[in-house]
Image (cartoon, rainbow, N blue to C red):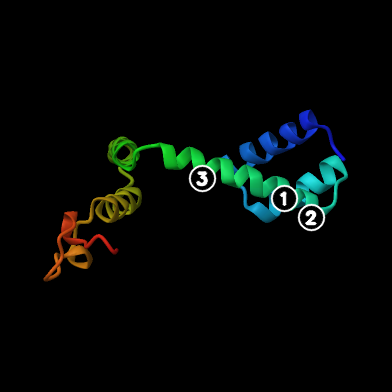
Amino acid sequence: MASTVATTERVNWALEQLMAGRGSSAVVSEMSQRWGITRRQAQRLTKRAHQTLVQDLDIVERTDMTAQLIALLMASAEQALKAKNSGAIVGISRELRALVGLGVDHAPRLGTTGRFGRSSWD
């Protein structure tokens, strides 16, 4: 059985990998090889890391996160305009539209009370 320090180190490593965008299966495989532990133990540690990640995201206000994403997308659009990259501009525009709920696919529906034409059940 690993010490508390070793377990914490492994969970933190898994958390870093998940935050970098790696999939859980890849993290589990590399963790079991890196530290010579069973896949089951690596899965448990990766699950703890994932739970930490979810808890951290729950703390962040959804509105704040949306504002950050909009700012990032707008800055990216500015760079794409400077580079005359029309494909990137189209992709960024689609992401912005989906994020803020614009367009035909987000038209207000009868009987909805939520913001941007969405009900609280969406």
Pick whichever of labels 2 and 3 is earlier in the sequence. 2
Q: Residue 54 carries which label?
A: 3
Label 1: which secondary element = helix
Q: In this view, does 46 lie to the left or right of 103?
A: right
Q: Residue 3 carries which label?
A: none
Which residue type does callout 1 highlight?
A: Arg
Q: Which quarter shows the N terminus?
A: top right
Q: Distance between the residues labelled 2 and 1?
A: 6 Å
In this orientation, which residue lies closer to the viewer: 29 or 81? 29
Mark toward the start of the polypeptide (3 vs 1)? 1
Q: Residues within 10 Å of mark 2 (few under 14, many from 20)?
A: few
Q: Name the residue under label 1.
A: 44
Specify the amino acid type for callout 2: Arg
Q: Give above or below for 19 relative to 3.
A: below
CA gap between label 3 and label 1 equals: 15 Å
CB contact under 8 Å: marks 2 and 1: yes
At mark 2, the secondary structure is helix
Circle 2 is placed at which residue position? Answer: 40
**Which image quadrant for residue 103?**
bottom left
* Circle 3/circle 1 CB separation < 8 Å: no
Label 2, label 3: how many angstroms apart (C-alpha)? 21 Å
Split into 4 quadrants, where in the image is the C terminus? Answer: bottom left
Question: In the image, is residue 6 above or below residue 43?
Answer: above
Depth check: give the residue in front, 67 or 94. 67
Indicate the secondary structure of the residue bearing disc 3: helix
Picture residue at 67% right of the left edge, 41% below the top: 14
